[in-house]
Image (spheres, coloured by chain):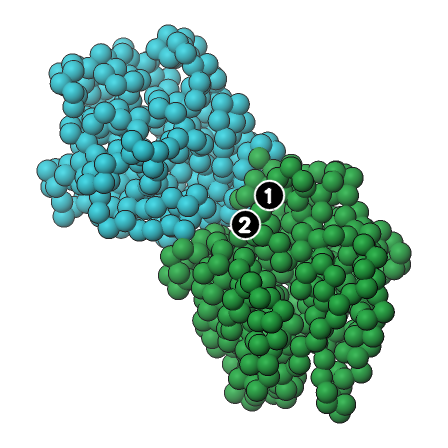
Chain colours: A cyan, B green
Amino acid sequence: MTRIIASTPRADGYRMPGEFEPHKQLWMLWPQRPDNWRLGAKPAQRSWVDVATAISRFEPVTVGVNNDQYENARNLLPEDVRVVEISSNDAWMRDCGPSFVVDDTGGVRLVDWIFNAWGGLYDGLYLPWDKDQMVPVKVAEIEGVDRYKAPLVMEGGSFHVDGEGTLITTEECLLSPGRNPDLNREQIEQHLRDYLNLEKVIWLGRGIDPDETTGHVDDVACFVRPGVVLAAATDDEDDWRYELLQENLRRLEAATDARGRKLEVHTLPMPAIMEITEDEAWGVDTAEGSLPRRPGDTTAASYLNFLIVNGGVILPAFGDPNDEVARAALAGLFPDREVVSVPGREIVLGGGNVHCITQQQPRG
Amino acid sequence: MTRIIASTPRADGYRMPGEFEPHKQLWMLWPQRPDNWRLGAKPAQRSWVDVATAISRFEPVTVGVNNDQYENARNLLPEDVRVVEISSNDAWMRDCGPSFVVDDTGGVRLVDWIFNAWGGLYDGLYLPWDKDQMVPVKVAEIEGVDRYKAPLVMEGGSFHVDGEGTLITTEECLLSPGRNPDLNREQIEQHLRDYLNLEKVIWLGRGIDPDETTGHVDDVACFVRPGVVLAAATDDEDDWRYELLQENLRRLEAATDARGRKLEVHTLPMPAIMEITEDEAWGVDTAEGSLPRRPGDTTAASYLNFLIVNGGVILPAFGDPNDEVARAALAGLFPDREVVSVPGREIVLGGGNVHCITQQQPRG
């Protein structure tokens, strides 16, 4: 039912749509590993239910789950959320999942990147990642969607596209020795051009989580629509992230996109730096070969890690005064979408947020 | 996406179609347990590929597979067969899978029976059967089909329907203490009437495998079409099965169906009794709590265990002189279908055949 296509999306006239284009459905994976999620992942699972419930108000949701958590996920998630068995090592559908591409005739295919748990043997977050690696294949089979196998280590959270030929990413992540050390910047760009059908790659510098995703762009910048970007910023010059966020802003303000437009750049504030508490750290299993969660470790909390859905925006909230500032800013930037806040702390304790745990499947 | 319907198919105007009615697709499960399938299930897997390939010439096939065999199944099965992750304890989709029902407006739902591995703690074939029990739920979720939860231990191989209100089954199986010991014949009939929308249950006596399925009807009789049945028979009066097959024939010849028709009864010969060889028995792991496979054990080989698909009939062959007799008989009974023979020995070594390892999903 599903073919592996030996050519490239670019050669076949397929492109990756922007997240703001219409979706057929949203994909997620159910969290469970006790060496990343505290208290046997129960607080995280509650947050997943919150996120899935919020999204399902706007569009269909399918959640993939390991067999041993299937009954629990099926029972906890709303009835109108589809629950399918898809094994995974953790629950980051954005990063281990596929990137969907479409053509002008209603065709939908997907790109199956190489996944190495954010750095492989260099600085990956866990070993093995064999189940994660198979997620795009299983999504393709369930949906009957043909598949491109891209010869590139990539995660969905390491780039955003405008759907019109422009991609933004970070040098910190894509040029990391943990990703594609045998490829230089130009070779990586060429693969991105081929597999996402691009004309222009805009390189930002760094993200805000060097130890986890190695600086994914989806914590620091995104497209609101073609020609309009949103970037994280802070006024606090003592915040270690101040300078890197300023540098990203400068690059965005200097950039033009694939159509030659100068970008309209907006900013979102950051929540205050959020540390893992002693109680939270004690809730996580210790395990050789997976990232420890220690008291005082800082999280990658960011409002930029929101998700755009059909008619809505799903925004993580942290109990921070800037929660409302971010919400109001997004309401202004997305006047035709309802902004829905969901609790983000339990998700970010595991290393990401709403955007990291979801992957949109565009309408054909 | 999938609801649990609290009423019954009968109350809602849904009925189970005959196997000879048009299918949307065929479901299978991938075999792997080494305490039932010899040589790590590799010969059985080859037969599954043969069967799936044969069916896929006529209609779409979806194969469910445990995660640890996903890559192997995906690589071995033809590209046009859909492979999805569905955990199972063994590979008998007919018995642990759902029974689909349809209404007159294109609606499709499924019946989720209680499954207890052919006898539960009384004389079941293995323990646990927790994964098998979830198969109908997972099929419903993947397909987005609503589900009736029937309060009855049943296997799909223990009955055949004509789609017009008649069911045939065996007393040996349905009245076994391993199935529904707290229900009498009339109560069981009432559940069948409610969940398959029937008017008439025709009770045969016994099947040919008391130690495995406790006498499933799908080894001894089936509907060719409404009003026409086919039954297994042997001329060898020394065969231990001679009398029980004669008794079933007598009952069918005396029966009328839900529409008041006398049944037209045809027969198929049996293959010679087939024993497990010493080499074959040595290929199977021994395990506490699962049925041993010993040299000299007789198998349940039967031509009745064929499958009707859109435009075809998939018939097991055993290298027996009657292979061709059965093939010719089916060609005559199904003049509009192509009869395709597939190797049946490896499948019957594990306890069933083509019909036992498949489950049709009707068109809506």
- What is the chain letter for disc 2? B
Please identify the quarter of the rendering in which residue A299 is found: top left
- Residue B188 position in % (x across, y down): 83, 56
Is disc 1 in contact with disc 2, using a CB cutoff of under 8 Å? yes
Hey, what amino acid is under mark 2? Lys
Hey, what amino acid is under mark 1? Gly
Q: Is residue B244 left or right of residue B301?
A: right
Residue B33 shows in this picture: no
Q: Is residue B35 above or below residue B20?
A: below
- What is the chain letter for disc 1? B
- Residue A198 position in % (x across, y down): 19, 31
> Which residue is most to the bottom?
B238
Quick one: SS at disc 1? loop
Q: Is residue A29 left or right of residue B231?
A: left
Please identify the quarter of the rendering in which residue A295 is found: top left
Q: Earlier in the sequence, mark 1 or mark 2?
A: 2
Distance from Cα at disc 1 to Cα at disc 2 = 8 Å
Q: Which residue is mark 2?
A: B24
Looking at the rendered image, the quarter that the C terminus of chain A falls into is top left
Please identify the quarter of the rendering in which residue B19 is found: bottom right
- Residue A313 position in % (x across, y down): 42, 19
- Residue B293 position in % (x across, y down): 61, 80
Q: Which residue is mark 1?
A: B364
Q: Is residue B231 left or right of residue A71?
A: right
Q: Going 77% across and 78% down the picture, which residue do you hit?
A: B245
Residue A12 shows in this picture: yes
Quick one: SS at disc 2? strand
Query: How many neighbours does mark 2 have within 10 angstroms: few (below 14), some (14-19), or many (20 or more)?
Result: some
Q: Going 67% across and 64% down the picture, which residue do you hit?
A: B224
Closest to the observer: B125 or B175?
B175
